[in-house]
Image (spheres, rainbow, N blue to C red):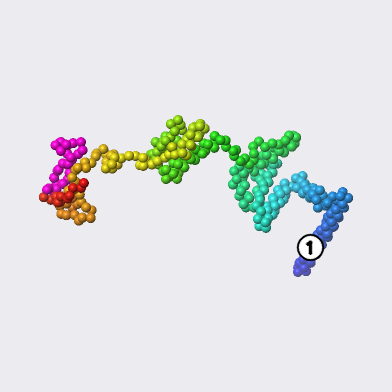
Amino acid sequence: MQLTDISSDTTGNAREVEDTSDSQLYLERLQTLFDKSLADLRSFAERESRSFQETQVKDQVAKWYCRDLFDPASVPQADLAERVSAILRATSRILETLEELAGLQSFFLVVNPSDPSDEGFLGGTLLGRDFWRAHRGCGTTGAKLFQEQCMKAKEAKKSGEPAVPDVPLVSAPPKKKGPASSLKSEVYAAVRDAVRAASGIRNAEMKWTDHSKLEAAYGIRVIGWPSSVPLQNPSSLSVTQNRQVLEELRNGSMRFEHVAQTSSSQPGTSSSDAASGVAVDENMDISWAYQDPDEPSEPGSFATGMGPRADVTIPVEGHTHAASSSVPLDVRQDSELPHKRPRLD
């Protein structure tokens, strides 16, 4: 039994040695054939007075080789896809190496026009790939558009017609604005800046069609709006009207002010008095009701809230002392009132 196993192992090892020898001999013969073909190509280039290193000889042979290598008729589809994927990944790694060595940034996109289900391959450096994905109109959508354009070009080539893209694959730069459009933008910006400067609110906006909303929203109002210009936004105004608004704003004829700064009040009266409609009689003696905040409260004073109640009347503007109109106040009896202080003039 043991002799049989030893014999089997010996036979197996002999076959492995024989296979290895055959492989080495095969590679040697293949290398010899390649060297002979290379020598023939060099001789051909010399006879034709062409440089072997130029694209006319060396690169053309490489193209023929790749064409035969990736010929769908001779290579199964699964193997072909694997080969293509391996080459694309290797190319992407080469570009990443260029980034490390020379700081170069790059990306490339590959699609298969013959396979509508193909999603394409995006390779290159990380920065380049991120740029393509984030750029407007690129990414998956851009790859699909590129594939469709390649399919149209392929069909046009068969029919002999030139392939012209229906739409640009990359967004074109915006067209230069005309004078009217530039003027509108200038009016928008100038008025908006003035509103924000007057209100102190960094995101304040002009109320073009209703200026009264400026007071409610920001506490400001517009002064000197041109009478010949309707309350509309600059897009609805003519060039002349927009220019007039801009000139009035620049020379100071039109401006924005706080409502509190432009409102007037009578001397000696406060805004709360004006709002309530009740004026204060300056001749009225109210010194008896004055309590100095730094003076300690005395027993029976208003600050202590002690003592019985009584009603007195004080005159109100618009009525005589003999009038029946009176305002009841919560006061104390005369014996408990504080000593009368000097009149406050």
User: Is residue 251 depicted above or below 9 in this figure?
Assistant: above
Q: Residue furthest bottom?
A: 2
Q: Residue 281: which quarter of the image?
A: top left
The amino acid type found where label 1 is placed reads: Glu
Q: Residue at x 57, y 37 (%)?
A: 177
Q: Nearer the viewer, residue 325 or 254?
A: 254
Q: Residue furthest left?
A: 335
Residue 306 visible? The answer is no
SS at mark 1 in the image: helix
Which region is colored magenta? 308-334
User: Is residue 336 depicted above or below 273 in this figure?
Assistant: below
Q: Is 296 one of the magenta-colored residues?
A: no
Q: Is residue 211 left or right of residue 27?
A: left
From the top left corner, tell me how far across and down residue 28 is, in percent. Answer: 83, 59
Q: Is the magenta region chiefly helix, strand or loop? A: loop
| Quadrant housing the N terminus | bottom right
Find disc 1 in the rendering and name its residue: 16
